């Protein structure tokens, strides 16, 4: 099992087709965070067994003994367990489960490669002492509107591992660096900016920072009340 799942559904019978019509898996942004698990279960937890491997489609089932795939990768309604994996499972104790919250265990080429994650913790503050409010999303969004009429110059974007401020602190937790535009993303390790042509302004997260948050299952949270942490290179 991945390190920080945030829920899932356990199926009590050996279905070779698992319906996908519930919870965060119905959100397009969450599809990269859907896993299939097989093994013993206890209550709402997963005590044994392991993650199965996502493959591109039925033609790729022959390359693995524990594969699964979406019926439609862009708008799925079901998960199909590869025939050999489903037949094998019928002979073993355990259940199939759909689990949410971790970067999908996928075969090479099925999804984007993992991108190096935030560093330089000694240069990244994680509290300004004057913050008045904050909000985030259950799944990572790379572009979203600035809400509540917040002052763009006094809003920070914070990377928070494990999806909650109260969760275990990680060395890369803290404010990302604001840059003038996405063209400046390469000048900082983890950056973000605004599209000020929209009303309200649109928050834009640099691709590397967004991909890292997706891979690590982190939350990107906006926090109001303090001057934003800015790149000082120009």
Image (cartoon, rainbow, N blue to C red):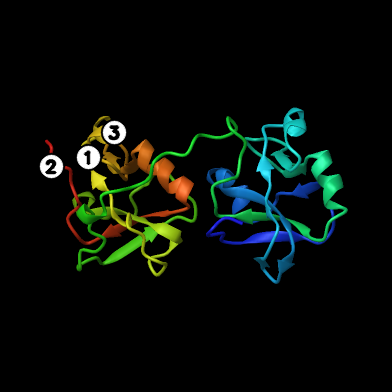
- CB of mark 1 within 8 Å of CB of mark 3? yes
- Residue 140 in sight here: no
Q: Position of residue 155 (x, y in %)?
A: 24, 54
Report whether 186 appears left or right of 54.
Answer: left
53 w.r.t. 61: above or below = below
**Which secondary structure lies at badge 3?**
helix
Q: CA distance from mark 2 to mark 1?
A: 9 Å
Residue where numbered disc 2 is placed:
232
C-alpha span from label 1 to label 3: 7 Å
Residue plotted at (24% across, 65% down): 131
Identify whether 40 is placed above or below 105.
below
Q: Which sits earlier in the primary sequence, circle 3 or circle 2?
A: 3
Say which residue label 1 marks. 179
Residue at (17, 55) in percent of width and height: 227
Q: Which residue is mark 3?
A: 182
Left or right for 134, reference 181? right
Residue drawn at the location 35% of the way across and 42% of the way down: 205
Rounded to the nearest angstrom, the CA distance separating label 3 from label 2 is 15 Å
Task: Give whichever of 127, 189 is nearer the camera.
Answer: 189
Front position among marks 3 and 2: 2
State the image coordinates of residue 149 (x, y, percent, origin top left).
Answer: 28, 54
Q: Nearer the viewer, residue 7 or 204?
A: 7
């Amino acid at each position: 099992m991945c390190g920080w799942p945030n829920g899932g559904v356990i199926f009590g019978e050996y279905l070779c087709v698992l319906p996908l019509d519930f919870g965060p898996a119905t959100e397009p942004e969450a599809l990269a965070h859907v896993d299939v698990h097989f093994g013993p279960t206890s209550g709402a937890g997963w005590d044994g067994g392991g993650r199965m491997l996502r493959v591109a489609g039925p033609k790729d089932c022959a390359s693995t003994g524990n594969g699964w795939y979406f019926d439609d990768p862009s708008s799925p309604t079901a998960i199909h367990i590869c025939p050999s994996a489903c037949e094998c499972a019928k002979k073993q104790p355990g259940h199939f489960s759909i689990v949410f919250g971790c970067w999908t265990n996928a075969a090479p080429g099925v999804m984007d490669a993992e991108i190096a994650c935030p560093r330089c913790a000694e240069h990244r503050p994680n509290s300004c002492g004057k913050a008045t409010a904050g909000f985030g999303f259950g799944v990572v969004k790379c572009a979203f509107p600035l809400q509540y009429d917040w002052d763009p110059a006094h809003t920070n974007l914070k990377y928070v591992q494990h999806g909650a401020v109260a969760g275990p602190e990680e060395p890369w937790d803290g404010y990302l660096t604001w840059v003038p535009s996405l063209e400046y993303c390469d000048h900082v390790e983890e950056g973000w900016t605004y599209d000020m042509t929209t009303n309200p302004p649109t928050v834009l997260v640099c691709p590397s920072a967004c991909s890292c948050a997706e891979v690590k299952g982190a939350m990107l949270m906006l926090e109001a009340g303090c001057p934003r942490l800015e790149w000082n290179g120009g």
